[in-house]
Image: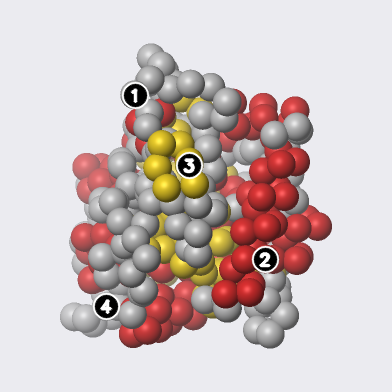
Amino acid sequence: MSVEPLDAKTVEALVRDAGAAPSMHNAQPWTFRFRFHSGGGTFELRSAPERAIPHSDPDNRALHIGCGAALFNLRVASVHIGREPVTTLLPDRADPDLLATVRLEAPLGPVHDLASLYPALSRRHTSRQPFTDQDIPKDLQGDLCEAARAEGAQLTFPAPWHVQELLDLVGDAEGRDAHDPGALEDLKRWTRTGTDTAADGVPEYAFGPRKERGRAPVRDFAGREAVADRGAATFEDAPCLALLGTVHDSPADWLRAGQALERVLLVATLGGLATALTSQALERSDLRWIARDPTTATGFVQMVLRLGYGPAGLETPRRAVREVLDLE
């Protein structure tokens, strides 16, 4: 079915929506190329190697997950404007920076399972605030697990003993990072304090309060530096954590995990949950393997999510569309 080609303004809006995705340290490691053709057009999603985080993400696993999240947002935004996104992952082995192509076609029908997620694209933000002790309803947990399954991943809510083990692993990772020059350099590169107004990284207004008490895993981007007007707070001792994993651990699996991650986060946002991501223990191969739950079918943990009821996160900067989009 032939459709009218998209105009440049619509293409830019799609890329803007895609760029709202989360990424490690808000590095936004993606670029898009849009090629017009008689059937509407095709996006190429490419990685931006210069935005890699070499010490904390040496295999570019987190880079692929962030790009996968942006890919999912692009799919949601495409459905929102009435186009069916036909997606191919890693289409060219000779071009490893080409992560996916998305050909926009006419919708297959009047109802699409991604359409309802569009309002959450602009509402989803990482929260580094304390959450309440209110339990997440089982029905909502089930919806989040189904969201991950729809993208070829698994989401599990670990038992209390496993949550405590995960918190110990995060503490171990934070202790190592505090004395690791490479990890400190990665963090410094993407931390924005004072008058730094870069369109990427984590700005100080999004750091959240300093953790005075509690065991919730919240990365402190300020480190030992004092930040003006930053208070302290008590966080959860028994946070609600969820593990996102895949059976295998290839670049294609990382892209699927990124899409699953964003789908889970959008469903959680629509369900009234605040969300945060925890990857400290996954940035070290020895700790990452221990993070898995041996009682489940999850082979490789790709992300640890912290979920709960509390203040929503604040919007963080995004690169201008002209910096990430190439129109052909």
Q: Whole-Å distance between the Cαs marked 1 and 2?
A: 34 Å
Mark 3 sits on what residue? 211
- The residue at 38%/20% (across/down) is 228
Q: Is residue 89 positioned above or below 278 on the image?
A: below
Q: Which mark is residue 112?
A: 4
Q: Are marks 4 and 1 in contact (CB under 8 Å)?
A: no
In what quadrant of the picture does the N terminus appear?
Answer: bottom left
- Mark closer to the observer (4, 3): 3
Amino acid type at image mark 2: Glu
In-image side of 90 versus 321 (left or right): right
- The residue at 65%/84% (across/down) is 296
Mark 1 sits on what residue? 229
Whole-percent x and y of residue 274? Answer: 34, 58
- Mark closer to the observer (4, 2): 2
Question: Judging from the image, what secondary structure is the residue with disc 1 in?
Answer: loop
Is disc 4 surrounded by few (<14), some (14 to 19) or many (20+) residues within 10 Å?
some
Is disc 3 surrounded by few (<14), some (14 to 19) or many (20+) residues within 10 Å?
many
Is disc 1 surrounded by few (<14), some (14 to 19) or many (20+) residues within 10 Å?
few
Whole-percent x and y of residue 163? Answer: 59, 68
- The residue at 67%/30% (across/down) is 184
Whole-percent x and y of residue 250? Answer: 70, 64
Q: Earlier in the sequence, mark 3 or mark 2?
A: 2
